[in-house]
Image (tube, grey):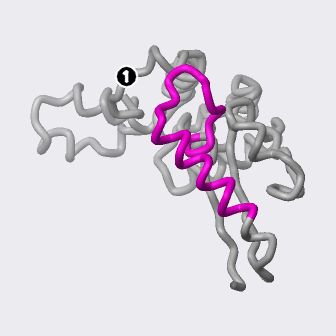
Amino acid sequence: SPCVIFFDEIDSIAPIRGMEGVHASTERMMSQLLTEMDGIQEMQGVVIIAATNRVDMIDTALLRPGRFDKIVLVSNPDRNTREKILEIHIRGKPVSKDIDLGRIADLTDGFSGADMSAVANTAISVVLQEYLAKYSTPEEAARHTSEALVSMKQFEEAIKKIKAQREMKPGDRVVMPHYR
């Protein structure tokens, strides 16, 4: 003490006990976490902060009074904020003049900041794959780098990919590179 303890994605270490798929070791870890949190009340200057995007998956014992005193909901960005997030992620990147950030923001309603980052990175990945497939050798591709511009077409494809990923159920997901 004093200190701040931050748990990112606390749902991964504090899932609902007794739920299908929760192992005994996870339940023991959860019990130990609750015990430790109860003991922290006696210490001065210790703050615990946690983040999750799956509050429905957190054991209710963790949310009882005295463990986390405040719960703050940070909702997904609105249209203007999504547009600003895109501006940040494409800054300095080779984009074509047909890019309409407002339209992209409209197409991504409900997306998080991380989703917007994934859209930008996926669009860049799509154009790079198209560009590299166009030329038979890396040397030839290097002579035509000015052609590798991200356009609305790649952003629309990226949005489809990210939407499809968002709609997958956890059991449907496979481990693979994200930007493909």
Name the foreground residue: 85 vs 27.
27
- Residue 101 visible in the current orientation: no
Which residue corresponds to the image point at 76% horizontal and 79% vertical from the top-left?
43
The span picked out in magenta is: 12-38
Which residue corresponds to the image point at 37% horizontal and 22% vertical from the top-left?
174
Q: Is residue 65 above or below residue 46?
A: above
Rendering quarter of residue 7: bottom right
| 32 within the magenta span | yes
Q: Disc 1 designates what residue?
A: 174
- Residue 10 visible in the current orientation: yes
Q: Secondary structure at mark 1?
A: loop
Q: Is residue 94 left or right of residue 16?
A: left
Give the percent coordinates (x, y) of residue 26: 51, 41
Give the percent coordinates (x, y) of residue 11: 63, 41
Dot 1 surroundings within 10 Å: few (below 14), some, or many (20 or more)? few
The amino acid type, in three-letter code, at marker 1 is: Val
Which residue corresponds to the image point at 20% horizontal and 46% vertical from the top-left?
142
Q: Is residue 1 above or below residue 99?
A: below
Q: Is residue 103 left or right of residue 17?
A: right
Rendering quarter of residue 152: top right
Name the foreground residue: 68 vs 112.
68
Name the foreground residue: 78 vs 8.
8
Name the foreground residue: 85 vs 34.
34
